[in-house]
Amino acid sequence: MQKEYRTIKEVVGPLMLVENVENVKYNELVEIEQANGEVRQGKVLEINRDRALVQLFEASQGLKISSSKARFLGKSIELKVSPDMLGRVFDGMGHPKDGGPEIIPEKSVDINGSPINPSARDYPDEFIQTGISAIDGLNTLVRGQKLPVFSVSGLPHANLAAQIARQAKVLGTDSKFAVVFAAMGITYEEADFFISDFKKTGAIDRTVLFMNLANDPAIERIATPRMALSAAEYLAFELGMHVLVIMTDITNYAEAMREVSAARKEVPGRRGYPGYLYTDLASIYERAGKIRGKEGSITQIPILTMPEDDKTHPIPDLTGYITEGQIILSRELYKKGFNPPIDVLPSLSRLKDKGIGKGKTREDHADTMNQLFAAYARGKEAKELSAILGDAALTEVDKKYAKFAEEFERRYISQGFDCNRDIEETLSIGWELLSILPKNELKRIKDEYLEKYLPERKA
């Protein structure tokens, strides 16, 4: 029987102070019962001797502390897990919000999880096909990787997230593939877009959705990614599935952390975010990976909007330190009407070399990838020079590079949000584009691949 306390002394916003408590633990769940039987929930944020600071999950309006009692439950927030979670929509605290029945759980798991022992980790080296050329061909996603998407306000990162969730699959394996989708601080319209898109395309059947809306409490927003990752760990390491976790928007999560930190009167760090932002983000991102001896895996794609389009802002800055690369969306490409507007030159997948090549994608992948990067970079320079000095300043070769850059953006990067290209098609488009350039310019590709794959030039 849990001990009840009638020593609630103060409520300020979502925070409540309970005095004379015994054996209370950090993160422990609390129930606050009012005289009329209404129960609200919260969790312990801080303990100082016999006083506990509790963060309420709901608003504190109408809470009469004189007649309320607090009950400490002796456990932290848990998620009930079962294979029946697939195809279901939950709120940020793991309660069904699709009108379906409650999940009959196989077990309950602590949402804070436990870190993967570094010595038990297996190295990520299997290609995941997203169906998006700018990712598959140039910034390849590997099973067990953490590859964030850096976007800015107004760009269609939601469409990109839905496209990856629909299309992603591991090639050359018959293992089951699942998507866990966590949305934090999104609008009702965005939530409706994701749910209807997944239902319309049938992707919902292999997806678990956790939806935290903008008007939901900040404390729920902090729990949402941990709910999603707990579901992913169950599906991956107990049911042997390959799980892709997509989280949007990490910026909203960090804002909720800043809000809670300010309410606790903590000393702020950079831009007002708490000093432990790096550690907290790492506790989320590092739950991705493969474990030796287990078939399943967790691959993460966190999506974040960079405040003020600033890559040096603490959220993208710290995310870049912890994760293995980044996919960057470009406002310039979006204005040209190219979707998805992925800026391939500053984008990076640090593990791409491990997931490509013979037996994974195709033998010529690495060479064509390097050649496409080099040609696009030179083509962009040629276009900039032409804009300043005019076409007359360009050599014939430079003009070909400028044409290559235009065609590359139009045909390779811009494929729309409904086009699902397999890796063979992506590589073929790359070769077609390289055929625009003189053969002696293709210095990064082995001669044997040029003979085998380079299309005949049209007269």
Image (cartoon, rainbow, N blue to C red):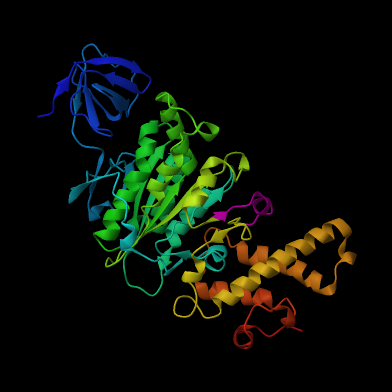
Image coordinates for residue 75, horizontal then vertical, percent: 20, 37
Q: Relative to residue 306, is residue 366 depicted above or below?
A: below
Question: Vertically, is 217 above or below 104?
Answer: above
State whether residue 7 appears in this view. Answer: yes
Q: Is residue 242 visible?
A: no
Q: Say which residue appears at 62% left-offset and 83% top-offset.
A: 446
For the record, the magenta segment spans 327-338
Is 32 inside the magenta-drawn segment? no
Location of the N terminus by quadrant is top left
Q: Is residue 354 above or below residue 49?
A: below
Q: Which residue occupies the extreme top position in the image? A: 66
Which residue is most to the right? 392
Q: Quadrant of residue 46?
A: top left
Q: Is residue 434 left or right of residue 179?
A: right
Q: Position of residue 236 (x, y in %)?
A: 30, 59
Left or right? Give the position of 402 relative to 341.
Answer: right
Image location of residue 341, percent across then percent down: 61, 55
Circle count: 0
Furthest residue in direction left, as rendered: 1
Identity of the residue drawn at 48% across and 80% down: 358
Tell me the quarter of the picture where residue 394 sits.
bottom right
Relative to 51, is 335 above or below? Answer: below
The residue lying at 79 percent from left, 58 percent from top is: 384
Quarter of the picture containing the C terminus is: bottom right
Residue 289: image quadrant is: bottom left
288 or 174, nearer to the observer: 288
